[in-house]
Amino acid sequence: MHASGTFRVRISSAEPSDLGREAGLGRIAIDKLWSGDIKGSSKGEMLTGNTAATGSMAYAALELVTATVGGKSGSFYLLHRATMMQSDPGTAVLEISVVPNSGTGQLAGLTGELHLHTSGEHEYDFVYQLPQSPENGRRNCPACIQLPEGYQMADKNVAGTEGVAKIKELTKDIHIAMLTTVSDDGSLHARPMATESADFDGTLWFITRIESGKVEEIRDDSHVLVSYEQPKDGVYLSLQGRAGIVRDRATIKQHWYKGADGWFKDGSDDPAAALIQVKITGGEYWQNSSSGVVRLGKLALASVLGADKVNVSDEGRITL
């Protein structure tokens, strides 16, 4: 299978570790928005190195892509490896491939290689394969990439008020969500949206401009997907729901937050301001049950005591 399109990337310098600094390594944060056959976002980090004497350069990077690929949604890791000699740029090598067994959701079992082109903007070609059936590959914990023998994820499904509480717990420290709508041609369109879930009661609220394209898409098809991620804590959440547009001024004021003033001249009284109301019907979550150090300790303990399996992460379905 083949996917192509463009992406926008924002990079920023980050402080390397003390050992990395001693080794002369540079550290760069990566933030991308994908469009085309891949729709979504990715975040990651790059390590760079070069030798002043010979002019050779190299970088390695890892980024988590949360997106739809060919209409299938999920997440996966991309691994970058690049080398180049300044004296002979023609010898440059760049390899970008999917980390084995890192695919989640409908992208479980994904394999492939990504090729980049630059012609005024960043273009990509993604040659990939997916198993015939989602059951060919079990959904994985994205934060773990691949679970070694002896590790497993505990299935913990929740419903009703317990499901509402679980969503509040997972999203309390996440302030950006990806909202995916259905375009008029049936393709999926995802974009980042500011979100606050402290008062979540089964409904999510997003501030929008009434003339935006997503408003028309929701009016044509109310099915939406809302996804959250917090990689440092190993939290990933995908929610399904039905969306609607609300223009009642009192309701807009109730769900207004100060950061939105920068987008609307008259704040919550701006006639262009509206709300997207998403009534959540269900979803799936993945959550590390302990820190990385504790997970390694559990595996070591299991090997000593002879335990067959060690739970290092939770996953489950949410029904509201």
Image (spheres, rainbow, N blue to C red):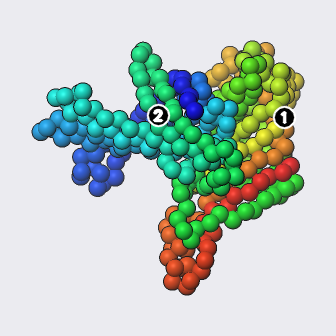
Q: Quadrant of residue 256?
A: top right
- Residue 253 located left or right of residue 143: right
Q: Name the residue under label 2.
A: 114
Look at 40% across and 41% down and name the residue there. Answer: 80
Q: In this view, does 291 lie above or below 80?
A: below
Q: Which amino acid does label 2 sit on?
A: Leu
Look at 59% across and 24% down and name the residue there. Answer: 36
Q: Mark 1 points at which residue?
A: 242
Look at 38% across and 38% down and name the residue there. Answer: 95
Q: Residues within 10 Å of mark 2 (few under 14, many from 20)?
A: many
Look at 65% across and 21% down and name the residue there. Answer: 263
Q: Give how far across and how far down residue 76 sits, in percent.
A: 56, 44
Instruction: Work out which quarter of the rendered image holds the N terminus and state it.
Output: top right
Q: In which quarter of the image is residue 157?
A: bottom right
Q: Is residue 227 above or below residue 6?
A: below
Q: What element carries label 2?
A: strand
Estimate the spatial distance between the alpha carbons at disc 2 and disc 1, rounded to whole Å. 34 Å
Q: Which residue lies furthest to the bottom in this view?
A: 305
Comparing 146 with 31, the one in front is: 146
Q: Give how far across and how far down residue 313 sits, in percent.
A: 63, 62
Q: What element carries label 1?
A: strand
- Residue 191 located left or right of residue 26: right
Q: Which amino acid does label 1 sit on?
A: Arg
